[in-house]
Every structure is written in structure tokens, then in C-alpha cells.
Image: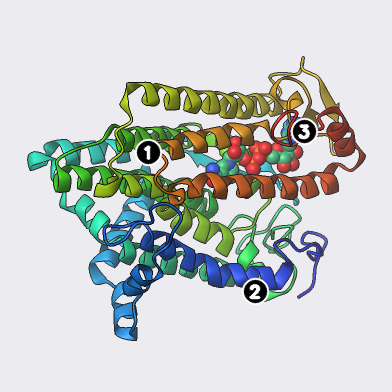
């Protein structure tokens, strides 16, 4: 597979190249059910000892059992109905037309930014469903709780199918001309190595679209993120109907996570400058991450807290302390992202910056003088706040803080490689001015 002026061959391979990509395609889908096996009504890890037998008993031992989980009819119907409904809302609800970053052919993509409308509609429908139901009992929510494993399997298979489809379509020429007057699709700068396994994993086409509908932005911000709210709600619903209580811990973590998700939807335009949108192709990594990994693993704290042995009662003081930590994290996260976004829109030109050879400016003032990715610190503080709601009964409920910490450090390294290649000496100058990567004076 060759390169072209528009799509140079990818030389630098991330994630340890082909073996790393293959390992992640094979192993990551097994981690989601594994996290479920160690945190459900049958068995939940307490302390640091793991009961291997209790896990083994839950693993399907025959093909019939496995196929029964993977192709559970009602779970497929529910998942496909969910995905279609969110797609329909996304395609029909009005929004603001916004330009993305400039592409390599000199053109700009236009996005319909309607996250506020879509997420408000979903929240309104959910609220109406709960409050109009007799005794607040919603069968669909109970189904989500009772069929966690089947729905996990459906999400994984669906995300695989999506990744295969976009990979195959990346080889089909465009029906219109690109900015250079050819029918060539714009591939990700990272996803044109020519190795099918690597390109499938990392994402080959930069912005797969059906007409003007952007599949990558949709998957990034809609079905998986909003499903996360539904899963949290299903956990509260289960706790209430099964045990007759709703603990302050499960309410707090679900509320904080809902705020995080809705913030992503309400400030959707901020996502247009994210690494995932500007640089990464849409392949297995993002499809699986957005549609399967995110909703089913990020909701682990709520599932953990829904189990009878983990009914944590925080009390007002702990609630206030967690709210304060979350508020601090949110403030750092939001203020820094907003400052970069406003600066890039040309509204903060009085601040100190470095002019680069590409014409783009690097802000080295305000939040962006504290650390190269001060926004990641905010995200990590938020992660701590969520995990602290689960108390100290088991390390498993701290999975998120470890995972997201690793993810953000890895992202910082990937971004460093990207910005070094893009800005050269000016990026080195920025790093001299702002030496800390994520945590001021520490890292
Ligand atoms: P950033 O928002 O930090 O974007 C990095 C890009 O911003 C760089 O590639 C560069 O792009 C530009 N940039 C870097 N430094 C500067 C500067 N000093 N001035 C102006 N522009 C600069 O990273 P992400 O896209 O990774 O993350 C966005 C948000 O999403 C973060 O808050 C992160 O925490 C969150 N996130 C959360 C995840 C989760 O699972 N919880 C996962 C991923 C992200 P350019 O080429 O335009 O110069």
C-alpha cells in the first residue's frame, strides 16, 4: 500500500507496532467482561484476595453458553433500538454549523453541533420514563442491569463490526473531489502504514462520513457516553427496587458522572480540537473505546456500589469533601480547556504565546503556563473524586483512576510526538518555557 502527497506512508508506529495492536484487539475486549466478573451480584472482590474459582464459575464453558451470551436476542434488539434512536435524534435535531480544524487538502469539515439538544432530549425521555412509571419501576432499566454481560458482548461485537466497516470503506474512492481535486479520502497521518492489523486498530480514514454525518464525532460523543448515564441509572434503579435503599454514594457518583457527560455534550465544540478528532483515524481503537469500553467500564463504580455488600453511606462531610475535590478538578479541566479554545478562536491575543512555523500559536500563559497538559490534571482529580465515593473496601473500584491516569500519561506522550513533528523547534521552545507535563512541580 503506497503513500501519496495527501496521504504519506505512516513510518512511526505507536503501541509497540503490529504486535501491540494485535494484542490490544485480542485482549482488551476480554477485560470488560473480566471487570464484570469481579464486580457483580454473584461475586465481588473484597480486599486484595481474588477468588479465582468464583470467577471461573461465571465464564461460559460451552460454545452454546458463549453464543447465548453473544447473540442474546433481546439485548441486540435493545442495543440496536438505542443506537438507532440516538442516530435519529442526532440527524434530526437542530444545531449550530461549525467548522473543524483545517485538513491536509486545505478544506474544512462542517459539523452540526447539536449535543445540547440531543442530550437534553435523552435526559428528558429518561426522566419522564422514570417519573411516570408505577413505583418508579422501569423494565428497560432493570433489563440493562440484569443483562450486563449480554449487553457488554453486544457492544463489543457492534464496535468490531463498525471498525471493520469503516476500515473497508476507507479503500473506496470518494464520490466527490477533495480539496486537491482528486477522489482520494484523507487518511489519518498515523493510520496509513500499509499493515492491515495496525491500520485497522489505529484507524485508517481520518473522518469517515455518510454524507455530512460524521461517524467519528457521533460515536465519540453520543451512543457510548449517553449509555454511561443509562447504566448508572440502572444501578440506582436496581439498588432501590432490590434493596429498598438509594445510598448517597451511588447518587453522588452517578450525578457527578452525569454532569461530566452532559458537559461534554453541552460544550461539544471543544471536542473539535481534541486529538481524537483532529489527528486519530476512526478504527478499532476509537470504535471499541467509545462504544464498548467507555460505557461498561466507566460505570464500574455505580455497579460496585449497587451490590448489597458495598452499600457505602458517605455522610454529609464525606459528600462535601468529594464535591470539593470534584469541583476543583472540574474547574481546572473546564477553565483550561475553555482558555485554549478561546485562544485558538483568536479571542485572547493579549496572552503570551509562541508563533509557530505553521502559523498556529501555542499559548504559554494562564493555565497553559502551569503544565503542558494542565487539563489532564483536572480530569484526573475528577477521577479520584468518583472513585472515592466507593470507600476503601476493594481496589477494584479504583480501576478508573489507574486506567485514566495511564491513558492521560500515554496521551501526553503521543501528543508530544505529534507536536514535535508539527512544530519542531517552536515545540522545544514551548517545553523549555513550560517544563511540567501534567502536574506542576511533580511531572
Ligand atoms: P488537548 O486538549 O490538550 O489537545 C492537545 C492539542 O492541543 C495538541 O495536539 C495541539 O494541537 C494543541 N495544543 C497543545 N498545547 C497547546 C498550547 N499550549 N496552546 C494551544 N494549543 C495547544 O488534549 P486531548 O485532545 O487529548 O484532550 C482534551 C480533553 O479531553 C482533556 O481535558 C482530556 O482530559 C479529556 N479526555 C478525557 C478522556 C477520558 O477518557 N476521561 C480521554 C481523552 C481526553 P494543534 O495541532 O491544534 O496545535
What's the mark number on residue 345?
A: none
Q: Position of residue 139 (x, y in %)?
A: 16, 52
**Residue ID for mark 1:** 119
User: Quadrant location of residue 177?
Assistant: bottom right
- Asked if one can make out residue 411 in the rendered structure from this viewpoint, the answer is yes
Q: Is residue 214 left or right of residue 412?
A: left
Q: CA distance from mark 2 to mark 3?
A: 35 Å
Q: Earlier in the sequence, mark 2 or mark 1?
A: 1
Q: Position of residue 149 (x, y in %)?
A: 33, 64
Look at the numbered disc 3 and give the secondary structure of its residue.
loop
* Image depth: mark 2 or mark 3 in front: 3
**Residue at the limit of the structure toward the left, as seen here:** 134
Q: Is residue 140 left or right of residue 300?
A: left
**Residue ID for mark 2:** 197
For the N terminus, give its image quadrant.
Answer: bottom right
Determine whether label 3 and label 1 are within 8 Å by CB.
no
Look at the numbered disc 1 and give the secondary structure of its residue.
helix
Mark 2 vs ligand 1: CB under 8 Å?
no
Q: Position of residue 266 (x, y in %)?
A: 46, 32
**Residue ID for mark 3:** 436
Amino acid at each position: 500500500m503506497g503513500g501519496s502527497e495527501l496521504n504519506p506512508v505512516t513510518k512511526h508506529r505507536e503501541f509497540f507496532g503490529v504486535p501491540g495492536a494485535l494484542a490490544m484487539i485480542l485482549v482488551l475486549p476480554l477485560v470488560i467482561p473480566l471487570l464484570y466478573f469481579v464486580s457483580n451480584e454473584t461475586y465481588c472482590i473484597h480486599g486484595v484476595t481474588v477468588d479465582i474459582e468464583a470467577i471461573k464459575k461465571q465464564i461460559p464453558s460451552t460454545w452454546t453458553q458463549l453464543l447465548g451470551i453473544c447473540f442474546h436476542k433481546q439485548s441486540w434488539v435493545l442495543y440496536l433500538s438505542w443506537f438507532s434512536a440516538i442516530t435519529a435524534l442526532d440527524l434530526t435535531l437542530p444545531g449550530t454549523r461549525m467548522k473543524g480544524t483545517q485538513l491536509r487538502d486545505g478544506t474544512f469539515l462542517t459539523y452540526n453541533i447539536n449535543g445540547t439538544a440531543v442530550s437534553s432530549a435523552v435526559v428528558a425521555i429518561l426522566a419522564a420514563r422514570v417519573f411516570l412509571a408505577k413505583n418508579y419501576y422501569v423494565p428497560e432499566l432493570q433489563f440493562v442491569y440484569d443483562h450486563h454481560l449480554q449487553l457488554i458482548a453486544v457492544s463489543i461485537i457492534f464496535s468490531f463490526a463498525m471498525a471493520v466497516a469503516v476500515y473497508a470503506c476507507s479503500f473506496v474512492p470518494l464520490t466527490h473531489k477533495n480539496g486537491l481535486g482528486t477522489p482520494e479520502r484523507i487518511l489519518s497521518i498515523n493510520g496509513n502504514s500499509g499493515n492491515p492489523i495496525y491500520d485497522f486498530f489505529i484507524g485508517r480514514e481520518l473522518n469517515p462520513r455518510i454524507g455530512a454525518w460524521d461517524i467519528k464525532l457521533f460515536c465519540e460523543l453520543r451512543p457510548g457516553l449517553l449509555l454511561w448515564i443509562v447504566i448508572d441509572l440502572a444501578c440506582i434503579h436496581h439498588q432501590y427496587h432490590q434493596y429498598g435503599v438509594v445510598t448517597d454514594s451511588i447518587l453522588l457518583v452517578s450525578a457527578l458522572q452525569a454532569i461530566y457527560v452532559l458537559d461534554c455534550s453541552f460544550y461539544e465544540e471543544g471536542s473539535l480540537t481534541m486529538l481524537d478528532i483532529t489527528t486519530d483515524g476512526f478504527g478499532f481503537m476509537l470504535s471499541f473505546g467509545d462504544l464498548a469500553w467507555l460505557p461498561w467500564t466507566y460505570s464500574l463504580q455505580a455497579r460496585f456500589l449497587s451490590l448489597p455488600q458495598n452499600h457505602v453511606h458517605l455522610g454529609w462531610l464525606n459528600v462535601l469533601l468529594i464535591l470539593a475535590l470534584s469541583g476543583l478538578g472540574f474547574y481546572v479541566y473546564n477553565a483550561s480547556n475553555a482558555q485554549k479554545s478561546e485562544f485558538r478562536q483568536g479571542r485572547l491575543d493579549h496572552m503570551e504565546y509562541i508563533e509557530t512555523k505553521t502559523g498556529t500559536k501555542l499559548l504559554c500563559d494562564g493555565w497553559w503556563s502551569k503544565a503542558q497538559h494542565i487539563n489532564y490534571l483536572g480530569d484526573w482529580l475528577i477521577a479520584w473524586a468518583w472513585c472515592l465515593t466507593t470507600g476503601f473496601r476493594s481496589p477494584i473500584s479504583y480501576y478508573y483512576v489507574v486506567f485514566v491516569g495511564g491513558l492521560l500519561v500515554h496521551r501526553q506522550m503521543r501528543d508530544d510526538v505529534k507536536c514535535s513533528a508539527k512544530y519542531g523547534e517552536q515545540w522545544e521552545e514551548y517545553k523549555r518555557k513550560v517544563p511540567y507535563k501534567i502536574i506542576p512541580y511533580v511531572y
